[in-house]
Image (cartoon, helix red, strand yellow):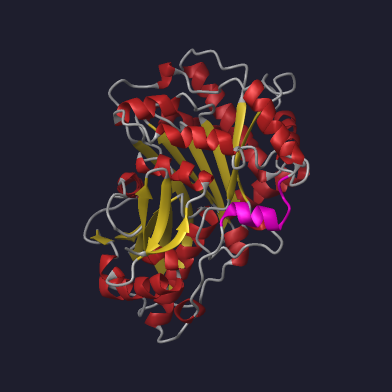
């Protein structure tokens, strides 16, 4: 029996139940370039770097164990180094395009962890490929949302490259010497910071009596024979990214609202292309980091889930005609600012709806079949369209150690593949890294077909081009 590192709280158990069935498995995909002749590394050096990272973070030496309605993260006391999973795929002798890398990343993000064993809670995949006659690699770092979040996972990926750079140059970076202690969960941090205000509990009570209308993708967008996870990446160069930032400042719209509005316009186009009436009632679903809302800011290196998930109804009287992009973006922006305000907003209406979380988690204790459990859980889904903007926080606050290896691109994704689908249909992640905007699109193919998701992404690009041209 391993020593208990921590017990999952109600929100983390909520995330755990999603992960068991294939949703909310977080993956950071980094494109790494070798900038010098001594930047080549093999699987043995990667394993050595992974051990340093594992010794730094107790959660990377842990496994999960369920005992009835309680779920524990427990520490391995030995042999955990031998349990590190590394998949090494060398494609340098093949013709590889970025498009051909995406299905490999998609498959990696779709692979379930075996939580009934004492396996580690994370894994790595390296894909070596050639681009413009230069050897590069895609590093896919995967871990489930109940023990981490996007800020933390992005930081872990940078830390791993820092260790690799240090090993390649015979140096010793901070990540190789500093060992971290396991931190408390979001409830403890919220209490220490007195963040949860009365208006959050009033919102929870209001929703219990007057729930939102649902904003779900039309069944006409599905294909009967499709299921699983669909992934795609989109990168904008420095010129286009700078233009986005400039035009948003001019129109007094934050980037989250800007990207979200483009997404809604692209989705409306998809409905029109399929001759489907777009819903009158639109829900907005946003993941907001709590790490940057604590005082002091919580170290991005510390593993655990510190995210609030909010959803709210868009004012259909002010948004919905899809004729004036910036007016719609400003309307959404005002509502996002109001709802995410730390004092007056509704940031904690999901994380602190303890009765609602317990009821949802109780579904998974049933002795019904997996299909019946998922079908029941899917009834709780309210919104099929979500955004998570990691912004420039990792770029601005996480130091990349100088060395032969350079991270040029970073993407964050959450798998969506439960069937019947019990989570969102389409998710977007945005990261600003080294002067460039990087977007991830993820979709549950049980909710939207591959063809329609491709159309949606094309619509997204077209809408963006209209704004930037």
Q: Position of residue 31 (x, y in %)?
A: 42, 60
Q: Position of residue 73 (x, y in %)?
A: 41, 57
Asked if 335 appears above or below 342 in the picture, the reply is above
Q: Where is residue 182 in the image (x, y as percent from the top left)?
A: 51, 66
Seen at 35% across and 53% down, the residue is: 65
Screen quadrant of the N terminus: bottom left
Image-quadrant location for residue 287:
top right
Q: Which residue sits furthest left?
A: 93
Asked if 164 appears above or below 124 in the picture, the reply is below
Q: In this view, does 254 lie to the left or right of 162?
A: right
* Closer to the camera in the image, 288 or 83: 83
Q: Where is residue 175 in the image (x, y as percent from the top left)?
A: 48, 76
Seen at 49% across and 23% down, the residue is: 270
Image-quadrant location for residue 56:
bottom left
* Closer to the camera in the image, 180 or 337: 180
Seen at 45% across and 33% down, the residue is: 423
Screen quadrant of the C terminus: top right
* Closer to the camera in the image, 440 or 20: 20
Residue 468 visible in this rendered orientation of the protein:
no
Asked if 2 appears above or below 107 in the picture, the reply is below
Q: Is residue 116 left or right of residue 436?
A: left
* Closer to the camera in the image, 191 or 146: 191
Residue 90 shown in magenta: no
The magenta segment is: 185-196
């Amino acid at each position: 029996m391993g020593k208990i590192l921590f017990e999952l709280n109600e929100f983390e158990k909520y995330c755990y139940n999603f992960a068991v069935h294939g949703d909310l498995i977080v993956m950071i995909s980094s494109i790494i370039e070798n900038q010098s002749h001594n930047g080549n590394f093999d699987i043995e050096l990667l394993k050595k770097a992974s051990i340093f990272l594992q010794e730094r973070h107790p959660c990377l030496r842990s496994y999960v164990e369920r005992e009835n309605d309680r779920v524990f993260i427990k520490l391995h006391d030995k042999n955990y180094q031998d349990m590190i999973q590394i998949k090494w795929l060398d494609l340098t002798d093949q013709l590889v395009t970025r498009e051909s890398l995406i299905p490999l990343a998609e498959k990696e993000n779709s692979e379930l962890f075996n939580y009934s064993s004492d396996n580690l809670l994370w894994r790595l995949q390296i894909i070596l490929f050639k681009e413009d006659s230069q050897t590069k690699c895609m590093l896919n770092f995967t871990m489930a949302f109940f023990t981490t979040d996007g800020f933390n996972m992005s930081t872990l990926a940078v830390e791993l490259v820092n260790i690799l750079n240090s090993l390649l140059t015979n140096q010793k970076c901070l990540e190789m010497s500093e060992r971290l202690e396991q931190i408390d969960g979001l409830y403890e941090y919220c209490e220490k910071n007195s963040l949860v205000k009365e208006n959050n509990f009033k919102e929870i009570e209001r929703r219990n009596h007057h729930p939102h209308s649902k904003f779900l993708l039309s069944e006409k967008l599905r294909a009967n024979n499709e299921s699983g996870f669909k992934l795609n990446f989109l990168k904008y160069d420095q010129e286009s990214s700078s233009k986005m930032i400039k035009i948003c400042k001019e129109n007094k719209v934050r980037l989250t609202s800007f990207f979200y509005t483009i997404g809604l316009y692209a989705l409306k186009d998809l409905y029109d292309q399929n001759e489907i009436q777009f819903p009158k009632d639109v829900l907005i679903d946003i993941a907001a980091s709590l790490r940057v809302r604590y005082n002091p800011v919580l170290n991005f290196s510390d593993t655990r889930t510190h995210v609030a998930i909010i959803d709210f109804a868009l004012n259909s009287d002010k948004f919905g005609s899809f004729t004036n992009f910036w007016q719609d973006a400003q309307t959404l922006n005002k509502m996002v600012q109001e709802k995410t305000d730390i004092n007056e907003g509704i940031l904690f209406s999901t994380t602190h709806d303890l009765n609602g979380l317990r009821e949802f988690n109780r579904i998974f204790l049933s002795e019904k079949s997996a299909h019946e459990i998922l079908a029941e859980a899917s009834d709780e889904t309210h919104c099929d369209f979500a955004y998570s903007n990691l912004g420039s926080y990792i770029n601005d606050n996480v130091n990349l150690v100088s060395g032969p290896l350079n991270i040029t691109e970073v993407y964050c994704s959450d798998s969506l593949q439960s069937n019947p689908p019990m989570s969102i249909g389409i998710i977007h992640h945005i990261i600003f890294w080294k002067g460039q905007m990087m977007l991830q699109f993820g979709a549950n193919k049980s909710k939207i077909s591959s063809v329609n998701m491709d159309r949606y992404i094309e619509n997204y690009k077209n809408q963006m081009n209209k704004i930037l041209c």
